[in-house]
Image (spheres, grey):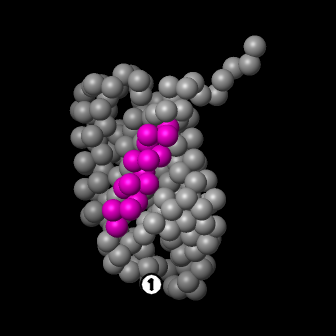
């Protein structure tokens, strides 16, 4: 008998969160070569609620949909050009962000109370830092910019907004986990 990777119920949950990621990416403020979106907020929530396996599958499906031409990326963009363009490294970085969040939450799964929120926030910070690093490296290569220019365009303006997104994602994760048992 074959073991299923994901149940029908889990596939439905993944599809729902792929849709949430797409909608969050469409909420975009173009402030330069890297737009401000709610994509990272969605990635934080996906990692915090779905964990490693379902979270990774969710982000991978989101990326694959964009790759094959479904306009799920910011500005309703799609295609391989987005993934190899200046902001593609950030999108690929979402895979690592969700892996870090899900893994650390699994490692510290027995922690409760306020310490669980601290671990969640730390995992988001680490995951976001990896995403920033991958995105910035690709931006430097594609745009032929200096590290200083890339940090000024791709990282520094997004630190405070991402911290706010992390705090909001923590609130959302805590609220959803209390009421929705399917995700656990």
Q: Quadrant of residue 47?
A: top left
- Can you tell which quarter of the image residue 181 is in? top left
Residue 127 in view (yes/no)? no
Q: Is residue 48 left or right of residue 80?
A: left
Most common SS among magenta residues: helix
Q: Quadrant of residue 157?
A: bottom left
Q: Residue furthest right?
A: 1
Quadrant in which the C terminus appears: top left
Q: Is residue 16 above or below residue 72?
A: above
Residue 43, magenta (yes or no): no
Q: Residue at x 50, y 25 (%)?
A: 9
Q: Residue at x 39, y 38 (%)?
A: 48
Answer with left or right where residue 62 lies relative to residue 121: right
User: Is residue 6 depicted above or below 169 in this figure?
Assistant: above
Residue drawn at x 37%, y 43% is 45
Residue at 49% in and 59% down:
72
Would residue 172 appear left or right of 149 to someone viewing this image? left
Residue situated furthest front in the rendering: 70
Q: Tell me residue 129's x, y (percent).
A: 44, 58
Q: Which residue is mark 1?
A: 149
- Quick check: 119 above or below 22? above
Q: Kindly tell me whether residue 113 is visible in this rendering.
A: yes
Q: Position of residue 133 (x, y in %)?
A: 50, 65
Foreground residue among 19 and 48: 19
Q: Position of residue 60 (x, y in %)?
A: 58, 48
Residue 121 x %, y %: 33, 45
Say which quadrant the N terminus sits in: top right
User: Which stretch appears magenta?
Assistant: 14-28
| Mark 1, secondary structure of its residue | helix
Front in this rendered view, residue 173 or 141: 173
């Amino acid at each position: 008998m074959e073991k299923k990777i994901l149940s029908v119920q889990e596939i439905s949950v993944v599809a729902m969160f792929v849709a949430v990621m797409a909608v969050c990416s469409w909420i975009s403020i173009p402030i330069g070569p890297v737009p401000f979106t709610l994509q990272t907020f969605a990635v934080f929530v996906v990692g915090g609620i779905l964990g490693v396996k379902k979270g990774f599958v969710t982000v991978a499906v989101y990326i694959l949909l964009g790759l094959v031409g479904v306009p799920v990326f910011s500005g309703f963009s799609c295609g391989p050009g987005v993934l190899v363009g200046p902001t593609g490294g950030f999108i690929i970085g979402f895979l690592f962000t969700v892996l870090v969040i899900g893994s650390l939450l699994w490692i510290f799964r027995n922690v409760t109370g306020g310490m669980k929120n601290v671990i969640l926030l730390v995992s988001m910070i680490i995951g976001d830092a990896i995403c920033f690093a991958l995105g910035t490296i690709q931006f430097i290569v594609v745009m032929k910019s200096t590290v200083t220019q890339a940090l000024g365009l791709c990282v520094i303006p997004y630190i405070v907004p991402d911290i706010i997104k992390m705090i909001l994602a923590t609130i959302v994760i805590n609220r959803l986990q209390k009421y929705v048992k399917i995700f656990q």
